Image (tube, rainbow, N blue to C red):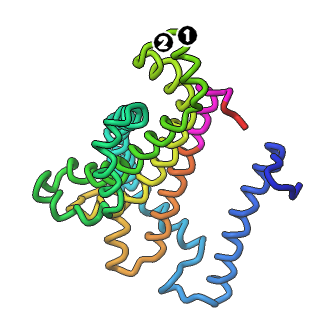
Amino acid sequence: MFRPLVPIARGWKIVLGIAFFVLFVGLWAAATFGGWVGPLFLKDPWQTVLSGWTLIAEHGYLIDIGITVWRVAGGFIVAAVIAVPLGILMGAYKPIEAFFEPFVSFARYLPASAFVPLLMVWAGLGERSKMAVIFIGAFFPLVLMVAVLVSATRRELVEAAYTLGAKPGGVVRRVLLPASAPQIAESLRLVLGWAWTYVIVAEYIAAERGIGKTIIDSQALAQTDQIIFGIVVIGIIGLVSDYAFKTVNQKLFPWSLA
């Protein structure tokens, strides 16, 4: 089983994945029920579940979840709609790459949280500013990832297309895009995960509802159980979306499966 790059059966993958979570919760329970960590710093798993149920049953937490999902999805989709075509153009045409790459490379190192004061002035305190934080966090890395994938297309495929009489636009449509599409889809899956990491920052901007807003309020009251529950909810949503993305990618590009 322990040989480099040798795949394992799907059943074993599921068992080992579940085993990690069981071990993690077991260590958490041992640390809290055993008194090694005080409840002020970390509540036990059972208390966390009860607090989560209270949030859902009495405080409309499902609405908060829906609002947060909407913000992440909105910012990510807008980023993808602009970043993917721009990345394809940069990867395919070197003059376009030379024009955009210095700025994109510069901007991707800027933390999205640094833009919060400006976004509050430019876009106000509504949903646009919150989605803009997600957009900034996802857009610039995605542009460069797509550009690198397209430009890494095997040169012999491009030369063969030109030999067969293809025009530059045809090479992009019939060679570069099909060759890089599976990797672009995988990049979208990865960047969606990054987009979720910006949601707490986004909901610092005068949010009235949302998972991040609940976490921020719980921090002020030292309610670590609610903070942990919010983090777990974000992780579960991210895990579900990740597997959904992966399944769709496998359906669309079955030839790319390892």
**Percent position of residue 180, x then y:** 54, 32
Pointers 1 and 2 in contact (CB under 8 A)? yes
- Tell me the residue that label 1 is attached to: 164
Can I make out residue 174 in this image?
yes
**Percent position of residue 5, x then y:** 79, 50
Residue 109 versus residue 127 in the image, above or below: below
Q: Say what amino acid the circle numbered 2 marks.
A: Ala
Residue 249 belongs to magenta span: yes
**Percent position of residue 8, x then y:** 83, 47
**Split into 4 quadrants, where in the image is the C terminus?**
top right
Residue 173 versus residue 3 in the image, above or below: above
Residue 218 belongs to magenta span: no
- Horizontal side of 222 relative to 161 (left or right) equals left
Q: Which residue is more in the foreground, 206 or 165?
A: 165
Magenta region, mostly helix, strand or loop?
Answer: helix
- Tell me the residue that label 2 is attached to: 166
Residue 222 versus residue 232 in the image, above or below: below
Q: Secondary structure at mark 1?
A: loop
**Split into 4 quadrants, where in the image is the N terminus?**
bottom right
Can I make out residue 63 in this image?
no
Q: Secondary structure at mark 2?
A: loop
**Percent position of residue 7, x then y:** 81, 46
Magenta extent: 243-255
Image point 46% across, 19% down: which residue? 173
Label 1 crowd (10 A; few <14 / some 14-19 / many >=20): few
- Horizontal side of 185 relative to 81 (left or right) equals right
Image point 58% across, 18% down: which residue? 160
The numbered disc on residue 31 is none
Q: In 3D space, how far apart are the residues under numbered discs 1 and 2 (Cα atoms)?
A: 6 Å
Q: Which residue is more in the foreground, 156 or 66?
A: 156
**Image mark count:** 2
